[in-house]
Each structure stands twice: as structure tokens, then as C-alpha cells.
Image (cartoon, rainbow, N blue to C red):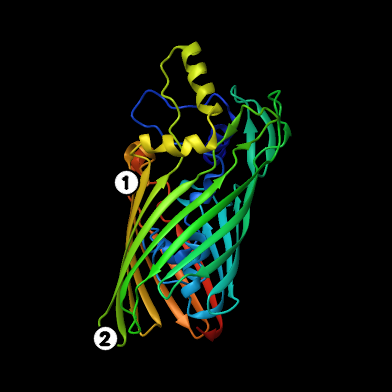
Amino acid sequence: MMKKIIVVCLLNVALVSSTFAQTDSINIVSTAVPFLRISPDARAGGMGDAAIATAPEANAVFWNLSKVGFAKKRTGIAFNYTPWLRDLGLTDVYLASMGFYHKLNETSAISSSMRFFSLGNIQLTDFSGNVLNTVRPTEFAIDGGYTRILSDKLSLAVALRYINSRLVTGDVGTGVVYRAGNSIAGDVSLFYNGVNGDGEGFTAGLSISNLGTKMGYTNDARNKDFLPANLGIGFGYTKAINDQNKITFALDLNKLLVPAAPVATGNFSVDSANLAEYRSQSVISSYGKSFSDPKSFTASIGAEYGYDEKFFLRAGYFYEDRSRGNRSSFSAGAGFNLNFMTINVSYLVPSGSGVTRNPLSNTLRLGIVFNLGDDY
């Protein structure tokens, strides 16, 4: 029953047009397809979700596509699996992802990625608790990209993404006919690679992701939600202790490019007008208005120790403001490099207790990366 209540609440946030900020201190910025903000890979998961400027490999397609221009292997393929919200007793909610890149030559590469999010089987009820029917909501995103090396230290990438969100379809008994949401989005990213031949140096990255059209779940053009557009910058530094031992430090800052919904006043006519104005604003104007909300950012700090490019230990911390969700948490992880294959695992350390317990506690991510072809 707990599972049903929790996930139906999530659906209500996405589908009910009257949902907006309450008068208390919590004002979570709601968007369509929030699964695009879930860390999809185990390597980054072990470093507090810091990945914009870390060493390039196949999982770079999820964070900063321009990094693959400096990847060591000609081809990379990554598979990741994340059971989601297991600490709440959910057993069939998960995120699965696949990333791929291939270098065409020394200066260019193509790539693709896919993310699939399953919310499991859900028993729908109306606001009175009457049983409606059972659904199995799913969401996915698939994209293709191109990376170009501009100089010996700088690369640029662009990607185009198709997003599908099938939460509820048809008339579920509420009098509203729902349909799958569809949208197109794009990414632009930059990467500076200052690492020298000894594997030591400074890196930096810029990633602007999910820039695209609003998504709607009904035929009402006025009832659409923003995509989770994001501006991210990242910094990294790798210190080569000796030929076998290296340590990397990483810092990511991410700003959600979506304005917060208007705060409820308790006056129905005023609130209705404010919400209508909020929903009618254009996507372009929403990017600018999002900067009036300084709290809708997250910070990730991570470290990775590597021994002989064979074994890796990772740790990190993810910060989010309490009024924007409070998903702050510590994480740890490890990696094992077996010739052409790397296995990654990460674990989100439990925090809080009772009603303050982090619902993402005990999140375990599993990933495998295949490094194929000649060295570049």
C-alpha cells in the first residue's frame, strides 16, 4: 500500500494541473520527466554525482558528451542499472541506461545513449480512495550526438534527444483523457583537458542539457510542464603520486533552468491567475527567470583513488537545499578494470531516521563499461 500511495503522489504531481507551491518553506521545482535528473551511472554515483570534468569514458555521454573526444579507446559501451527507492519498499522501480561512443578519427566522434525508467505496477485511485485501474508507467529518452576536438586541449559536442513519458493513457475514470507525453531536447557541452602525459593536470567542463519544448499529458495546450533543463559546470584535478597511484578530486555545480511555481496565497482567483501566468511563459523566458531562484542548484564533491589503472576507490557528497528537496547524501564506490572491461559499483549511505530518513538511502548502482579498439 505504501508503494501505491507514494508513486500515485508522483503521478499526481505530473498530471494535476493545479499543483503548485505551498505556503510553507518547501518549494520543490517540479518538471516533466524528472528521471533525466537521476544519476544514471555507477562511477559518478560513487563520487556524489560529480562527472562533468572527470576522466572521459563511455558514461561521459550522460554528463558531458564533449569528454569522449579525449577518451583513450576508439570505442566505448556502458551499461548501468539502478534500483530506485528501495529504502521505501519499492521492488520494481528502476532506471536502466546504455551509453555508446565511437571515434571516427583523431578529431571527431559519434555517440548515442538511452535511459529507461520503470515505475512498476501501480493501482490508481481517485481523491476519494476509490479504485480505478492498474497501470505500469514507463519513461525513456534516446539521443544521438557528435563531438569535435577543437584543439589539443578543448572539445565541443552537441546532442539531440527524443523523450517519451507514458504515465497514464486514456480515461482512467477522472473525466480527463491522458496521453503519452513527447518532447525533443538538445545538449551543448565543452571540455578542457589539461592532463599531461603522466596523467596529471586540471580539467573543466560545461554542460547545458535538456533544452527543449514543454511536455503535455493531455490535449490541453495550456497544461504543459517544463523539461528539466540544466546548466552544469565542473572542475577536476588529478595528482599522479607515482607511476601506479593517482588521486582525482572533482567538483560539479548544477543549476536547474526552471523557475519555481508561484507560492499559494489562499485566494483562489489570485492563485489561478498566478498559475496560469506561470504555465503560459515561454521556454526561453523561463531560463532567465530561473536565475531569480538561487536555491535551485546542487553541488557534488567527489574523489577517486586509482591504483595501476586496475582498481579504484571513490567517495563523494551530494548537496541540495532543504527547501528544494534536501537530497543531500554521502556515497561510496569502487571500480575494477579487467583488460577491456571495467566494473563499477556505488552505494548511497543511509542518512536520517524516521520521517527525516533520506528515501534514496541504500541506493545501489551497478555498471559495466567495455573499452574497445585501439588506443588514441
Residue 298 place in picture, x, y as percent: 36, 48
Element class at badge 1: loop
| Above or below 139: residue 240 | below
Instruction: Looking at this view, name the residue that lies furthest to the front.
Output: 151
| Of the pair 87 and 177, the residue shown nearer to us | 177
Compared across the picture, whether 260 is left or right of 137 comes to: left
Residue 249 place in picture, x, y as percent: 30, 67
| Of the pair 239 and 81, the residue shown nearer to us | 239
Residue 315, image quadrant? bottom left
> For the point 38% across and 80% down, which residue is it?
311
Report which residue position mark 1 lands on: 352
Amino acid found under the numbered disc labelled 2: Asn
Residue 321 place in picture, x, y as percent: 33, 42
Q: How many marks?
A: 2
Residue 353, image quadrant? top left
| Above or below 219: residue 327 | below
Distance Cα–Cα, label 2 vs label 1: 40 Å
Amino acid found under the numbered disc labelled 1: Gly
> For the point 30% across and 74% down, which residue is it?
201
| Of the pair 376 and 136, the residue shown nearer to us | 376
| Above or below 159: residue 296 | above
Residue 54 place in picture, x, y as percent: 39, 68
Q: Residues within 10 Å of mark 2 (few under 14, many from 20)?
A: few
Q: In the rendered structure, find residue 4 and report the number of the disc placed on it.
A: none
Report which residue position mark 2 lands on: 242
| Above or below 111: residue 32 | above
Compared across the picture, whether 373 is left or right of 253 comes to: right
Q: Is residue 208 among the parts visible in the rendering?
A: yes
Which of discs 2 and 1 lies nearer the camera? The answer is 2
Return the disc, 2 or 1, that comes first in the chain's sequence.
2
Q: Is residue 30 among the parts visible in the rendering?
A: no
Element class at badge 2: loop
